Image: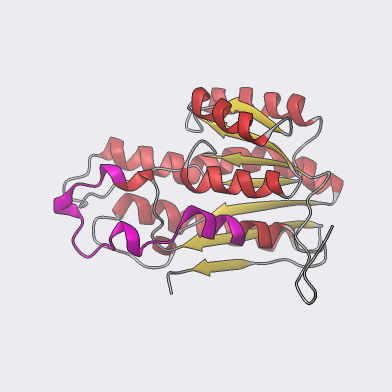
Amino acid sequence: MITTPGAAPAPSLDGVSAVVTGASRGIGEAIARALAGAGASVALVARGRAALERLAGELGPRAHVVPCDVRDETAVQGAVAAIGAALGEAPRVLVNNAGLFDVAPLAEQSPSDFAATVDANLVAPFRFIHAFLPAMLAAGRGHIVTVGSIADRHPFPGNGAYAASKFGARAMHEVLRAESRGTGVRATLVSPAATDTAIWDAVRGDRRAGLPTRDQMLRPEDVARAVLFAVAQPPHVTVDELRISRS
C-alpha cells in the first residue's frame, strides 16, 4: 500500500464480514460501498432485489445480495440464515441503517403509519441485534453500528413517529453499549443531520417549512466515512457516538 508521507493509511477491513441493512440506496448504499472498498465482505440487505444486484455487480464477489423486508419477522429469519450461508460466519460488523421517514403532524398521522415507522426504525434493528449479538458475545468480538439521526435528540414538528423511533434507537444503543462493555463487542451510534437521499422525494412542499434545501444537506458519503472510521478502529478503541452536521 502506498501512502502520502504524513497521511494516515487507508483503513483496511480485509477478512471482516459485515451486514448493512437498507443497502439498496442512499446512506446504506454509501456505507456498503465504503466497507467493501476497505476490503470487507458485505451482505446487502434491502427489499429491492434489482437494486441490490446492481450494487453487488459493481462491488464484486465480496458483495452478497439478501433481499428482505426488515419489518417482516419471518423474512428477517430467512435473511439471517442467508447471511450465515453467504458469509460463512456470523458477521463481525452489523450496520442497522434501514428505516422509514414520514413527515406528518401527530394530529394527522394514522396509528398504522406511526406503528410502521417505529417497526422499521426501532423493532427491525432489534431483530438483527437479537439474531447476531449472541454469536458476537460468544466470539468476544463484533461491532454494531446504529445509524441514528439529528432527530434522536432534537424534536422537530412533524417528526412524531420518526423522532419517537430514533429516540428509542438511541436508547437501545446506550443499553447495548452498557451491556457489552468489556466483552469485546463494540457499539457505535452515528447520527447525521439531514442527508440528501431519496427519502426526501416524498416530502410534500407544504411540509418542508423550516427544512434545509437538498443542496444544504449532508451527502450519503459523509455518513459512510463516519461509519468506516468507527469500525476501522483498533479492537481496544470504541467510538461511542458520532454526531454529524453540515458545516
Residue 136 in view of the camera: yes
Q: Is residue 143 left or right of residue 46?
A: right
Considering every residue shown, the one lying at the far left of the view is 206
| Residue closest to the eye, 59 or 15 | 59
**Is 170 drawn above or below residue 34 in the view shown?**
below
Residue drawn at x 57%, y 26% is: 53
Q: In this rendering, does residue 172 appear at all?
A: no
Horizontal and vertical percent for residue 55? 57, 33
In this orientation, which residue lies closer to the viewer: 121 or 63?
63
30 relative position to 184: left or right: left
Say whether residue 221 is magenta.
yes
Query: Along the line of sight, which residue is nearer the eye, 38 or 161?
Result: 38
Q: Nearer the viewer, residue 177 or 70?
A: 70
The image shows residue 133 at horizontal and vertical percentages of: 72, 44
Residues in magenta, as a range: 201-226
Q: Quadrant of residue 43?
A: top right
Above or below 129: residue 71: above
User: Can you say which quadrant of the picture contains the N terminus?
Assistant: bottom right
> Hey, which quadrant is residue 21 in on the image?
top right
Quadrant where the C terminus lies?
Answer: bottom left
